[in-house]
Amino acid sequence: MEFVLQKNQFYIQEPKYGEWLERNKERGQTFTEYWNKDGNIKPIQPTEKRKKIYFQLYGHFNETQLRLMDSVQRFLSIFYELPIQRLEQKSLDSTQLDTTNWRVQQRNGFQVKTGFILDSLEKNLPSDGVLLVGFTTNDLYPSQKWSFVFGQARLHDRVGVWSMVRFGDADLISQDTDAFNLALQRTCKTAVHEIGHIFSLQHCIFYRCAMQGSNNLTELDGHPSYFCPVCDAKIISNLNLPLSQRYENLAAFWKNQQQLETSNYYRKSALSLRRMD
Ligand SMILES: [Zn+2]
Ligand SMILES: [Zn+2]
C-alpha cells in the first residue's frame, strides 16, 4: 500500500520532560509486527458475526454533552466505517452502587471505579459486537493508589470506558463554542485511540499520531486526531477500509466542526490518492 506522506505534518520531536515517551520506553509496533504472521496472536478483527461497535453512556449527560457524544459517534462511524449502535444509558448514582465501587475524595469529589464499569460492559457486549465502549461524565479511578484515571480498557475482552469530565467544564461547554470544540476534539482523540488499542494497535512512536501515548491533557492536545500512515495502514488493512472516499468523509466531518487544519489534511490526502488512481 502506498501513502503520500505530508512529511512536516508527521515530524515527531524528542519527548520533553514528563511526556509519555520520556516516562515510558516503548519500542513501537511496525506494520509487519502488527500482523505478526508467524505468531499466534492475531489482531482483533470484525467478523461476519461480530461487526458492530457498541457504545454505552454511564451517568448524567446534559443536552450539550449528549450532542457532543452524537458527534463523537458520527466521527467514529466515519473513521472505522463500522455500524455503531448505542445501548441503553445507565445511571451511576452512588445510592445504587456498592460502596466498594465509588469514593469521594477531597480533591476530586465523587469518583467511580473503572473495574465496576468494565465488568458491567463485559457482561453487556452483544453477540454481534466487535467491541463495546463506555463513556461517562463522572470522574474515574482504577484503584485506591491512583488519584484518577482518564479511562481504562480490557483489550482482550473488547471493552473500555473513558470519562469526559476532565475534557471541559460542563457549563462552559454549553455556553462557549471554543470550549465545546475542544472537548469534542479531546473526546474524539481518546475514543479513536482506545478503539485502536482494542483493534490491537500499540502506541505509535514513529510520527505525530492519534495513537501516541499521552500523560496529560497538554500532551493530548498536541496530538492530532488522525492516524499517521503506519497506524492508518494497520487499521485500513484490518477493516478493509476504502481509501480516498473515507478521507473525503473525514474532511467533511471536520470541516463541519470548524477544524480546518484536520479537514485540510484529509482533503489533501484524498486528493493525492485520487491522483494515483
Ligand atoms: Zn494508549
Ligand atoms: Zn501512528
Image: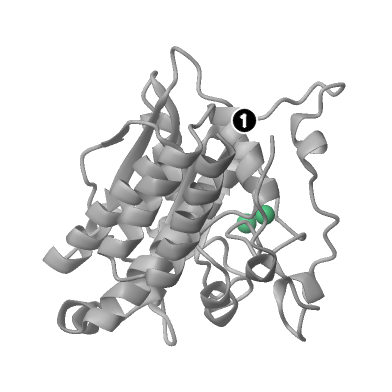
**How far across and how far down the image is residue 39, in percent?**
85, 24
The quadrant where residue 129 appears: top left
Furthest residue toward front:
275
Figure disc tally: 1
Identify the residue under disc 1.
237
Q: Nearer the viewer, residue 115 or 104?
A: 115
Taking the image as four quarters, which one is ligand 1 found in? bottom right
Q: Amino acid at mark 1?
A: Ser
Q: Which residue is found at the position 35% from the left and 61% from the top? A: 254
Q: Which residue is found at the position 82% from the left and 37% from the top? A: 33
Q: Nearer the viewer, residue 18 or 105?
A: 18
Can residue 108 be seen at all in this image of the molecule? yes
Q: Nearer the viewer, residue 248 or 94?
A: 248
The N terminus, quarter of image: top right
Q: Which residue is found at the position 80% from the left and 67% from the top? A: 24
**From the viewer's perspective, is 25 left or right of 213?**
right
**How far across and how far down the image is residue 72, in percent?**
32, 54
